[in-house]
Amino acid sequence: MPGENLPALLKGKRVLVTRAQHQSAAMCARIRDYGGEAVQVPLIDYRQAPLSYEERKNWLDAVQQADWVILTSRNSLDFFMNLLDRRERLQGIRLAVVGKKTGEHLKTYGLRADFIPEAFTVQGLLDAFSDHRFKADRVVVPFGSLSDIGWLEKLRDLGIRVTSCVLYQTEANVSSQARLEGIIESGSLSAITFASPSAVRFFKEFLTERAWRGAMKKCTIAAIGLTTAQALDALGYAPDVVPARFTAVDMIDALANYYSNNEGSHRNEQQS
């Protein structure tokens, strides 16, 4: 937890945090706990998706008829609750969430998760339904405009009726572009952290190819989980760090351990 007396494994390290600002407090605190400097440049904005009256009504009706609501992130939870008109619609419905932190955030709404897969992945959810630990005729899944929803077909293959809806839009935080360009140009970063494939995408889009490739080669790269790691792989830069548990704090712990195990330096890291 933030505030622990941790070894200064990130001392002298400047760590770029690209996550949305409202989601990065614990992550930045963890970097400081290890003696590092958190450099916040939020690359992502989230906005409520516009829904017509009919779309909103159909979605809320589907929620009320569902056996399960599947929430894959804190964002999906927040925008789901923002749109929910009556808490009574959730009566008798079970809630599955991906990730311990999303489960904890659910409690702030006075709700609790009925299932959190151990690996904090959608595959864990799929396994729970496919091996008949849980039964469902209907599920609803709120998601974002850039979310990977290919896994929903696997639920449908199990005979489950799936209703999904884009409740929020994931957009580039263009106000951060100039700051990102300046920090990358300075060459002062030690590590770059990515908490979503969208962050990888916007990092690449905000910079010239020479700049983003140079940063990827120079810095230690940390990804929060497998889908983010795959986005980096697709660019030709496999991350140096992927935590065993896919949370932001675990990513920083894994980054600190990486430096400890590699004598404090990335294989390509050049100290300026």
Image (cartoon, rainbow, N blue to C red):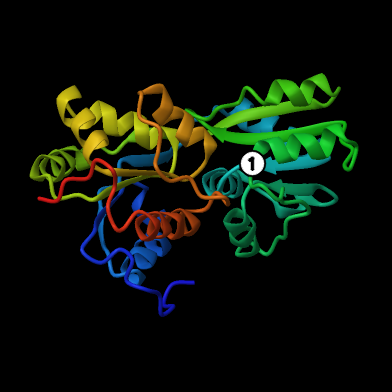
Q: Residue furthest bottom?
A: 5
Percent of width and height locating residue 222: 39, 45
Q: Using the rendered image of the protein, determine whether residue 232 is visible from the camera's viewpoint.
A: yes
Secondary structure at numbered mark 1: loop
Q: Is residue 205 left or right of residue 29?
A: left
Residue found at x 42% / y 27% = 233
Observer-nearest residue: 91 or 205? 205
Q: Is residue 156 left or right of residue 76?
A: right
Observer-nearest residue: 224 or 42? 224
Q: As displayed, is residue 198 above or below residue 79?
A: above
Q: Which residue is mark 1?
A: 121
Q: Amino acid at mark 1?
A: Thr
Q: Quadrant of residue 23?
A: bottom left
Residue found at x 62% / y 22% = 150
Q: Is residue 86 left or right of residue 221?
A: right
Percent of width and height locating residue 138: 82, 32
Percent of width and height locating residue 263: 31, 58
**How many numbered badges does the structure rendering display?**
1
Q: Is residue 128 left or right of residue 190?
A: right
